[in-house]
Image (tube, rainbow, N blue to C red):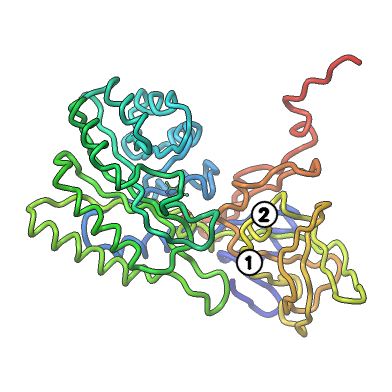
Amino acid sequence: MEIRGKSVYFGGVALQELVNRFGTPLYVYDGAKMVSQLNRLRRAFTIPHQIKYAIKALPSLSVLKWLRKHEAGADAVSIQEVKLALHAGFLPHEIMFSPNCAPFEETTAAVQLGVQVNVDNLPFLEQFGKLFGRTYPCAIRLNPHIKAGGNEKISVGHSDSKFGISILQLDEIKKIVHRYNMQINGLHIHTGSDIADADVYLKMADIFFSVLDDFPDVVFLDFGSGFKVPYREGDASLNIEELGAKLSNMILDYSHKKRRMPELWLEPGKFLVSEAGWLLATCTVVKETPSRTFVGLNTGLNHLIRPMMYGAYHHIVNVSNPADQPENYTVVGYICETDTFGTDRMISKVREGDVLAICNAGAYGYSMASNYNARLRPAEVLVINGEPHLIRKSDTWDDLLRGQVVIDL
Ligand SMILES: *Cc1c(COP(=O)(O)O)cnc(C)c1O
Protein backbone atom coordinates (compact mmCIF):
# COMPACT_ATOMS: atom_id res chain seq x y z
CA MET A 1 0.00 0.00 0.00
CA GLU A 2 1.13 3.47 -0.76
CA ILE A 3 -0.53 6.74 0.22
CA ARG A 4 0.07 9.65 -2.16
CA GLY A 5 -1.70 12.82 -1.08
CA LYS A 6 -5.26 11.75 -0.34
CA SER A 7 -5.17 8.58 -2.46
CA VAL A 8 -4.19 5.04 -1.63
CA TYR A 9 -2.35 3.16 -4.36
CA PHE A 10 -2.23 -0.57 -4.87
CA GLY A 11 0.16 -2.14 -7.38
CA GLY A 12 0.59 1.32 -8.89
CA VAL A 13 -3.16 1.90 -9.39
CA ALA A 14 -5.27 4.34 -7.37
CA LEU A 15 -7.77 2.23 -5.45
CA GLN A 16 -10.47 4.79 -6.12
CA GLU A 17 -9.99 4.13 -9.84
CA LEU A 18 -10.51 0.40 -9.27
CA VAL A 19 -13.61 1.10 -7.23
CA ASN A 20 -15.05 3.47 -9.84
CA ARG A 21 -14.46 0.91 -12.56
CA PHE A 22 -15.37 -2.36 -10.87
CA GLY A 23 -17.48 -1.40 -7.84
CA THR A 24 -17.41 -3.08 -4.45
CA PRO A 25 -17.17 -5.59 -2.91
CA LEU A 26 -14.09 -6.46 -4.93
CA TYR A 27 -11.05 -8.67 -4.57
CA VAL A 28 -7.90 -7.02 -5.95
CA TYR A 29 -4.57 -8.78 -6.39
CA ASP A 30 -1.13 -7.32 -7.02
CA GLY A 31 0.67 -9.57 -9.54
CA ALA A 32 4.04 -7.96 -8.84
CA LYS A 33 3.78 -8.78 -5.13
CA MET A 34 3.18 -12.46 -5.93
CA VAL A 35 6.26 -12.50 -8.13
CA SER A 36 8.42 -10.73 -5.56
CA GLN A 37 7.40 -13.32 -2.95
CA LEU A 38 8.19 -16.12 -5.41
CA ASN A 39 11.60 -14.64 -6.11
CA ARG A 40 12.30 -14.11 -2.43
CA LEU A 41 11.65 -17.78 -1.82
CA ARG A 42 13.85 -18.77 -4.77
CA ARG A 43 16.73 -16.61 -3.58
CA ALA A 44 16.55 -18.08 -0.08
CA PHE A 45 17.25 -21.62 -1.26
CA THR A 46 20.64 -22.18 -2.81
CA ILE A 47 20.15 -25.82 -3.82
CA PRO A 48 18.07 -27.26 -6.69
CA HIS A 49 14.42 -26.79 -5.83
CA GLN A 50 10.91 -26.56 -7.21
CA ILE A 51 8.16 -24.28 -5.96
CA LYS A 52 4.66 -25.68 -6.37
CA TYR A 53 1.97 -23.08 -5.76
CA ALA A 54 -0.79 -24.44 -3.51
CA ILE A 55 -3.80 -23.82 -5.72
CA LYS A 56 -6.34 -23.93 -2.92
CA ALA A 57 -5.15 -20.59 -1.55
CA LEU A 58 -6.40 -18.73 -4.65
CA PRO A 59 -7.49 -20.92 -7.55
CA SER A 60 -8.38 -18.34 -10.20
CA LEU A 61 -7.12 -19.38 -13.64
CA SER A 62 -5.41 -16.08 -14.43
CA VAL A 63 -3.49 -16.23 -11.14
CA LEU A 64 -2.43 -19.78 -11.98
CA LYS A 65 -1.31 -18.64 -15.42
CA TRP A 66 0.57 -15.69 -13.94
CA LEU A 67 2.46 -17.85 -11.45
CA ARG A 68 3.27 -20.44 -14.12
CA LYS A 69 4.60 -17.66 -16.34
CA HIS A 70 7.02 -17.01 -13.48
CA GLU A 71 7.99 -20.65 -13.37
CA ALA A 72 6.05 -21.93 -10.41
CA GLY A 73 4.62 -25.44 -10.46
CA ALA A 74 1.28 -26.32 -8.91
CA ASP A 75 0.12 -28.25 -5.86
CA ALA A 76 -3.40 -29.67 -6.03
CA VAL A 77 -5.53 -31.29 -3.34
CA SER A 78 -8.49 -32.35 -5.50
CA ILE A 79 -8.80 -33.76 -9.00
CA GLN A 80 -10.67 -30.60 -9.91
CA GLU A 81 -7.66 -28.51 -8.88
CA VAL A 82 -5.48 -30.77 -11.04
CA LYS A 83 -7.78 -30.05 -13.97
CA LEU A 84 -7.78 -26.32 -13.24
CA ALA A 85 -3.98 -26.36 -13.29
CA LEU A 86 -3.94 -28.21 -16.63
CA HIS A 87 -6.53 -25.78 -17.95
CA ALA A 88 -4.30 -22.88 -16.92
CA GLY A 89 -1.43 -24.37 -18.92
CA PHE A 90 0.60 -26.31 -16.35
CA LEU A 91 2.16 -29.45 -17.80
CA PRO A 92 1.27 -32.69 -16.02
CA HIS A 93 4.74 -33.17 -14.56
CA GLU A 94 4.63 -29.67 -13.03
CA ILE A 95 1.65 -30.66 -10.88
CA MET A 96 1.77 -32.42 -7.52
CA PHE A 97 -1.47 -34.06 -6.37
CA SER A 98 -1.78 -34.49 -2.58
CA PRO A 99 -5.33 -35.59 -1.79
CA ASN A 100 -6.53 -36.56 1.66
CA CYS A 101 -9.45 -38.99 2.03
CA ALA A 102 -10.52 -38.25 -1.54
CA PRO A 103 -11.85 -41.31 -3.40
CA PHE A 104 -9.03 -43.50 -4.74
CA GLU A 105 -10.44 -42.93 -8.24
CA GLU A 106 -9.06 -39.37 -8.04
CA THR A 107 -5.57 -40.78 -7.66
CA THR A 108 -5.98 -43.13 -10.63
CA ALA A 109 -7.46 -40.25 -12.65
CA ALA A 110 -4.40 -38.16 -11.80
CA VAL A 111 -2.16 -41.00 -12.97
CA GLN A 112 -4.07 -41.09 -16.25
CA LEU A 113 -3.41 -37.35 -16.60
CA GLY A 114 0.28 -37.93 -15.93
CA VAL A 115 0.71 -35.81 -12.79
CA GLN A 116 2.90 -36.56 -9.78
CA VAL A 117 0.77 -38.24 -7.13
CA ASN A 118 1.25 -38.36 -3.39
CA VAL A 119 -0.27 -41.15 -1.28
CA ASP A 120 -1.32 -40.40 2.28
CA ASN A 121 -2.62 -43.67 3.75
CA LEU A 122 -1.67 -47.37 3.83
CA PRO A 123 -4.79 -48.81 2.13
CA PHE A 124 -4.27 -46.52 -0.88
CA LEU A 125 -0.56 -47.31 -0.96
CA GLU A 126 -1.46 -50.98 -1.20
CA GLN A 127 -4.02 -50.33 -3.95
CA PHE A 128 -1.56 -48.15 -5.83
CA GLY A 129 1.08 -50.87 -5.60
CA LYS A 130 -1.34 -53.54 -6.81
CA LEU A 131 -2.46 -51.44 -9.76
CA PHE A 132 0.77 -49.86 -10.90
CA GLY A 133 3.65 -51.80 -9.34
CA ARG A 134 6.80 -50.21 -10.75
CA THR A 135 5.08 -48.76 -13.81
CA TYR A 136 4.16 -45.41 -12.23
CA PRO A 137 6.01 -43.64 -9.42
CA CYS A 138 4.35 -42.05 -6.41
CA ALA A 139 5.37 -40.02 -3.41
CA ILE A 140 4.44 -40.81 0.18
CA ARG A 141 3.05 -38.24 2.58
CA LEU A 142 4.45 -38.86 6.03
CA ASN A 143 2.98 -37.76 9.31
CA PRO A 144 6.04 -36.77 11.33
CA HIS A 145 4.30 -36.28 14.67
CA ILE A 146 5.40 -32.70 14.88
CA LYS A 147 2.98 -30.21 16.33
CA ALA A 148 3.25 -27.00 14.35
CA GLY A 149 1.10 -24.23 13.01
CA GLY A 150 -1.06 -21.38 14.12
CA ASN A 151 -4.08 -23.18 15.53
CA GLU A 152 -5.90 -26.51 15.77
CA LYS A 153 -7.69 -26.28 12.44
CA ILE A 154 -4.55 -25.66 10.44
CA SER A 155 -2.13 -27.81 12.41
CA VAL A 156 -2.07 -31.04 10.43
CA GLY A 157 1.19 -32.84 11.22
CA HIS A 158 0.64 -33.96 14.83
CA SER A 159 -0.10 -37.50 15.95
CA ASP A 160 -3.87 -37.08 16.09
CA SER A 161 -4.00 -35.56 12.63
CA LYS A 162 -5.78 -37.30 9.74
CA PHE A 163 -2.96 -36.37 7.33
CA GLY A 164 -0.15 -38.57 6.10
CA ILE A 165 1.11 -42.02 7.03
CA SER A 166 2.54 -42.09 10.53
CA ILE A 167 6.30 -42.32 10.66
CA LEU A 168 5.65 -45.03 13.28
CA GLN A 169 4.17 -47.16 10.48
CA LEU A 170 7.38 -47.12 8.49
CA ASP A 171 7.70 -50.92 8.60
CA GLU A 172 4.26 -51.32 7.08
CA ILE A 173 5.09 -48.79 4.38
CA LYS A 174 8.26 -50.69 3.53
CA LYS A 175 6.46 -54.03 3.38
CA ILE A 176 3.93 -52.71 0.88
CA VAL A 177 6.60 -50.97 -1.20
CA HIS A 178 8.66 -54.19 -1.39
CA ARG A 179 5.65 -56.44 -1.99
CA TYR A 180 4.74 -54.54 -5.16
CA ASN A 181 8.24 -53.40 -6.08
CA MET A 182 6.96 -49.82 -6.02
CA GLN A 183 8.86 -46.78 -7.21
CA ILE A 184 8.65 -44.21 -4.42
CA ASN A 185 10.11 -41.10 -6.04
CA GLY A 186 9.38 -38.56 -3.33
CA LEU A 187 8.71 -38.08 0.36
CA HIS A 188 6.38 -35.36 1.56
CA ILE A 189 5.53 -33.68 4.85
CA HIS A 190 3.15 -30.77 5.30
CA THR A 191 2.61 -30.05 8.96
CA GLY A 192 0.23 -27.11 8.97
CA SER A 193 -0.13 -23.44 8.28
CA ASP A 194 1.16 -20.27 9.96
CA ILE A 195 4.47 -21.79 11.09
CA ALA A 196 6.85 -19.10 12.28
CA ASP A 197 9.62 -21.39 13.52
CA ALA A 198 12.29 -22.52 11.02
CA ASP A 199 13.26 -25.41 13.31
CA VAL A 200 10.07 -27.24 12.35
CA TYR A 201 11.42 -27.66 8.81
CA LEU A 202 14.85 -28.68 10.03
CA LYS A 203 13.19 -31.40 12.10
CA MET A 204 11.41 -32.57 8.96
CA ALA A 205 14.77 -32.81 7.19
CA ASP A 206 16.08 -35.01 10.02
CA ILE A 207 13.06 -37.27 9.63
CA PHE A 208 13.53 -37.49 5.86
CA PHE A 209 17.24 -38.27 6.25
CA SER A 210 16.50 -40.97 8.81
CA VAL A 211 14.36 -42.92 6.33
CA LEU A 212 15.92 -42.06 2.95
CA ASP A 213 18.12 -45.18 2.90
CA ASP A 214 14.93 -47.22 2.76
CA PHE A 215 13.77 -45.41 -0.38
CA PRO A 216 16.49 -45.56 -3.03
CA ASP A 217 14.19 -44.22 -5.79
CA VAL A 218 13.44 -40.96 -3.99
CA VAL A 219 14.52 -37.95 -6.04
CA PHE A 220 12.67 -35.20 -4.19
CA LEU A 221 11.85 -34.19 -0.65
CA ASP A 222 8.72 -32.07 -0.38
CA PHE A 223 8.64 -29.91 2.76
CA GLY A 224 5.07 -28.72 2.12
CA SER A 225 4.42 -25.22 3.26
CA GLY A 226 2.80 -23.36 6.12
CA PHE A 227 5.17 -20.39 5.99
CA LYS A 228 3.73 -17.76 8.27
CA VAL A 229 3.30 -14.30 6.78
CA PRO A 230 2.86 -11.14 8.86
CA TYR A 231 -0.75 -10.07 9.28
CA ARG A 232 -0.10 -7.01 11.42
CA GLU A 233 2.79 -4.72 12.12
CA GLY A 234 5.37 -6.39 14.33
CA ASP A 235 3.76 -9.80 13.74
CA ALA A 236 6.06 -12.80 13.93
CA SER A 237 6.63 -14.39 10.56
CA LEU A 238 8.84 -17.16 9.28
CA ASN A 239 12.30 -15.92 8.38
CA ILE A 240 12.51 -17.43 4.91
CA GLU A 241 16.10 -16.35 4.36
CA GLU A 242 17.22 -18.07 7.57
CA LEU A 243 15.21 -21.18 6.73
CA GLY A 244 16.57 -21.26 3.18
CA ALA A 245 20.17 -21.00 4.31
CA LYS A 246 19.86 -23.61 7.05
CA LEU A 247 17.82 -26.12 5.08
CA SER A 248 20.00 -25.75 1.98
CA ASN A 249 23.06 -26.44 4.11
CA MET A 250 21.50 -29.48 5.74
CA ILE A 251 20.65 -30.99 2.36
CA LEU A 252 24.08 -30.16 0.97
CA ASP A 253 25.75 -31.84 3.95
CA TYR A 254 23.56 -34.87 3.47
CA SER A 255 24.39 -35.04 -0.23
CA HIS A 256 28.13 -34.92 0.48
CA LYS A 257 27.89 -37.65 3.07
CA LYS A 258 25.59 -39.92 1.09
CA ARG A 259 26.49 -38.94 -2.48
CA ARG A 260 22.85 -38.40 -3.14
CA MET A 261 21.16 -35.05 -3.78
CA PRO A 262 17.39 -35.06 -3.47
CA GLU A 263 15.66 -32.06 -4.98
CA LEU A 264 13.88 -29.77 -2.52
CA TRP A 265 10.20 -29.09 -3.17
CA LEU A 266 8.04 -26.46 -1.48
CA GLU A 267 4.29 -25.86 -1.77
CA PRO A 268 3.57 -22.29 -0.66
CA GLY A 269 0.05 -20.92 -0.85
CA LYS A 270 -0.27 -18.12 1.65
CA PHE A 271 3.33 -16.99 1.26
CA LEU A 272 2.81 -16.23 -2.43
CA VAL A 273 -0.63 -14.66 -2.49
CA SER A 274 -1.81 -13.58 0.97
CA GLU A 275 -0.26 -10.14 1.10
CA ALA A 276 -0.91 -9.63 -2.62
CA GLY A 277 -4.67 -9.50 -2.12
CA TRP A 278 -7.13 -7.03 -0.63
CA LEU A 279 -10.86 -7.20 -0.23
CA LEU A 280 -12.43 -3.78 -0.90
CA ALA A 281 -15.83 -3.06 0.60
CA THR A 282 -18.00 0.00 1.08
CA CYS A 283 -19.23 1.25 4.43
CA THR A 284 -23.02 0.94 4.36
CA VAL A 285 -23.60 2.46 7.79
CA VAL A 286 -21.74 3.94 10.74
CA LYS A 287 -23.80 2.71 13.66
CA GLU A 288 -23.34 4.22 17.11
CA THR A 289 -24.50 2.07 20.00
CA PRO A 290 -24.15 2.71 23.75
CA SER A 291 -21.10 0.44 23.80
CA ARG A 292 -19.28 0.96 20.51
CA THR A 293 -19.25 2.35 16.99
CA PHE A 294 -19.84 -0.21 14.28
CA VAL A 295 -18.76 0.20 10.70
CA GLY A 296 -21.05 -1.99 8.57
CA LEU A 297 -19.70 -3.18 5.20
CA ASN A 298 -21.27 -4.52 2.02
CA THR A 299 -19.38 -7.79 2.51
CA GLY A 300 -19.23 -10.44 5.19
CA LEU A 301 -18.13 -13.92 6.14
CA ASN A 302 -19.55 -15.08 2.81
CA HIS A 303 -16.60 -13.35 1.11
CA LEU A 304 -13.87 -13.62 3.74
CA ILE A 305 -14.37 -16.15 6.50
CA ARG A 306 -10.84 -16.24 7.98
CA PRO A 307 -11.48 -13.80 10.84
CA MET A 308 -14.52 -15.78 11.98
CA MET A 309 -13.22 -19.28 11.23
CA TYR A 310 -9.63 -18.97 12.41
CA GLY A 311 -9.76 -15.85 14.55
CA ALA A 312 -7.40 -14.38 11.94
CA TYR A 313 -6.30 -10.77 12.19
CA HIS A 314 -6.68 -8.74 9.00
CA HIS A 315 -5.48 -5.15 8.91
CA ILE A 316 -8.19 -2.69 7.80
CA VAL A 317 -7.58 0.64 6.09
CA ASN A 318 -9.98 3.41 5.12
CA VAL A 319 -8.80 3.94 1.56
CA SER A 320 -11.29 6.74 0.85
CA ASN A 321 -10.05 8.84 3.75
CA PRO A 322 -6.64 7.46 4.72
CA ALA A 323 -5.10 10.40 6.55
CA ASP A 324 -7.87 11.68 8.83
CA GLN A 325 -8.14 11.43 12.62
CA PRO A 326 -8.13 7.73 13.69
CA GLU A 327 -11.18 6.61 15.64
CA ASN A 328 -12.14 3.38 17.37
CA TYR A 329 -14.40 1.15 15.26
CA THR A 330 -15.65 -2.39 15.22
CA VAL A 331 -15.88 -3.45 11.59
CA VAL A 332 -18.63 -5.92 10.74
CA GLY A 333 -20.20 -7.56 7.71
CA TYR A 334 -23.74 -7.65 6.35
CA ILE A 335 -24.44 -11.34 7.04
CA CYS A 336 -27.17 -12.28 9.52
CA GLU A 337 -24.74 -13.91 11.86
CA THR A 338 -21.93 -12.32 13.83
CA ASP A 339 -19.28 -11.61 11.23
CA THR A 340 -16.79 -9.26 12.80
CA PHE A 341 -13.74 -8.37 10.70
CA GLY A 342 -12.06 -6.43 13.48
CA THR A 343 -12.88 -5.27 17.01
CA ASP A 344 -11.66 -1.99 18.50
CA ARG A 345 -9.65 -0.95 15.47
CA MET A 346 -8.18 2.52 15.20
CA ILE A 347 -9.10 3.54 11.65
CA SER A 348 -8.97 6.91 9.94
CA LYS A 349 -12.43 8.51 10.32
CA VAL A 350 -15.04 6.48 8.43
CA ARG A 351 -18.02 8.07 6.70
CA GLU A 352 -20.87 6.17 5.07
CA GLY A 353 -19.85 5.41 1.48
CA ASP A 354 -16.14 5.21 2.29
CA VAL A 355 -14.28 2.23 0.87
CA LEU A 356 -12.33 0.09 3.34
CA ALA A 357 -9.62 -2.37 2.40
CA ILE A 358 -9.26 -5.62 4.31
CA CYS A 359 -5.61 -6.56 3.82
CA ASN A 360 -3.89 -9.94 3.45
CA ALA A 361 -6.99 -11.32 1.81
CA GLY A 362 -5.31 -12.98 -1.17
CA ALA A 363 -5.07 -16.44 0.37
CA TYR A 364 -8.14 -18.38 1.48
CA GLY A 365 -10.33 -15.35 0.75
CA TYR A 366 -12.15 -15.82 -2.53
CA SER A 367 -11.36 -19.53 -2.50
CA MET A 368 -13.47 -19.99 0.64
CA ALA A 369 -16.25 -17.60 -0.43
CA SER A 370 -19.84 -18.78 -0.64
CA ASN A 371 -23.34 -17.64 -1.51
CA TYR A 372 -24.49 -17.70 2.12
CA ASN A 373 -27.50 -15.42 2.72
CA ALA A 374 -28.12 -15.68 -1.05
CA ARG A 375 -25.37 -13.12 -1.56
CA LEU A 376 -23.36 -12.86 -4.74
CA ARG A 377 -19.62 -13.52 -4.69
CA PRO A 378 -17.55 -10.49 -5.72
CA ALA A 379 -15.47 -9.92 -8.84
CA GLU A 380 -11.69 -10.38 -8.86
CA VAL A 381 -9.17 -8.03 -10.44
CA LEU A 382 -5.49 -8.78 -11.03
CA VAL A 383 -3.17 -5.80 -11.40
CA ILE A 384 -0.17 -6.39 -13.67
CA ASN A 385 2.27 -3.62 -14.61
CA GLY A 386 -0.09 -0.97 -13.27
CA GLU A 387 -2.91 -2.34 -15.44
CA PRO A 388 -6.03 -3.77 -13.76
CA HIS A 389 -7.48 -6.89 -15.40
CA LEU A 390 -10.88 -8.32 -14.53
CA ILE A 391 -10.17 -12.03 -13.97
CA ARG A 392 -13.55 -13.11 -12.61
CA LYS A 393 -16.92 -11.45 -12.88
CA SER A 394 -19.08 -11.13 -9.82
CA ASP A 395 -21.90 -13.63 -9.46
CA THR A 396 -25.24 -12.78 -10.99
CA TRP A 397 -28.81 -13.58 -10.05
CA ASP A 398 -28.67 -16.48 -12.55
CA ASP A 399 -25.79 -18.04 -10.61
CA LEU A 400 -28.05 -18.29 -7.57
CA LEU A 401 -30.68 -20.17 -9.59
CA ARG A 402 -28.26 -22.36 -11.58
CA GLY A 403 -28.56 -26.03 -10.77
CA GLN A 404 -31.70 -25.65 -8.70
CA VAL A 405 -34.61 -27.88 -9.67
CA VAL A 406 -37.91 -26.29 -8.79
CA ILE A 407 -40.50 -29.02 -8.38
CA ASP A 408 -44.17 -28.70 -9.28
CA LEU A 409 -46.23 -28.21 -6.16
C1 LIG B 1 -2.83 -26.07 2.09
C2 LIG B 1 -1.63 -26.79 1.65
C3 LIG B 1 -0.48 -26.08 1.31
C4 LIG B 1 -0.35 -24.58 1.41
O1 LIG B 1 -0.32 -24.11 2.70
P1 LIG B 1 -0.07 -22.54 3.00
O2 LIG B 1 -0.11 -22.43 4.47
O3 LIG B 1 -1.16 -21.78 2.32
O4 LIG B 1 1.25 -22.17 2.43
C5 LIG B 1 0.60 -26.82 0.84
N1 LIG B 1 0.54 -28.16 0.72
C6 LIG B 1 -0.56 -28.88 1.04
C7 LIG B 1 -0.56 -30.35 0.86
C8 LIG B 1 -1.68 -28.21 1.51
O5 LIG B 1 -2.77 -28.92 1.82
Local secondary structure at mark 1: loop
- Of label 2 and label 1, which has the lower sequence position? 2
Q: Amino acid at mark 1?
A: His
Residue located at (46% from left, 57% from top): 272
Q: Say whether residue 88 is visible.
A: no
Classify residue 47 as left or right of residue 243. Answer: left
Q: Tell me where residue 243 appears, x and y as whole percent.
A: 32, 67
**In this picture, residue 245 sits left or right of residue 78:** left
> In the rendered image, which residue does mark 2 sit on?
304
Quarter of the C terminus within the rendering: top right
User: Which residue shows up at 76% across the image and 25% down it?
Assistant: 404
Q: Nearer the viewer, residue 205 or 243?
A: 205
Q: Secondary structure at mark 2?
A: loop
Residue 132 or residue 114, whichever sits in front:
132
Residue farthest along the top direction in this orientation: 408
The verdict on label 1 being within 8 Å of ligand 1 is no
Q: Is residue 164 above or below residue 287?
A: above
Q: Dot 1 surroundings within 10 Å: few (below 14), some, or many (20 or more)?
A: some
**Residue drawn at (22%, 50%), measured in percent from left and top?**
263
Mark 2 surroundings: few (<14), some (14-19) or many (≥20) residues within 10 A: many
Q: Which residue is mark 1?
A: 314
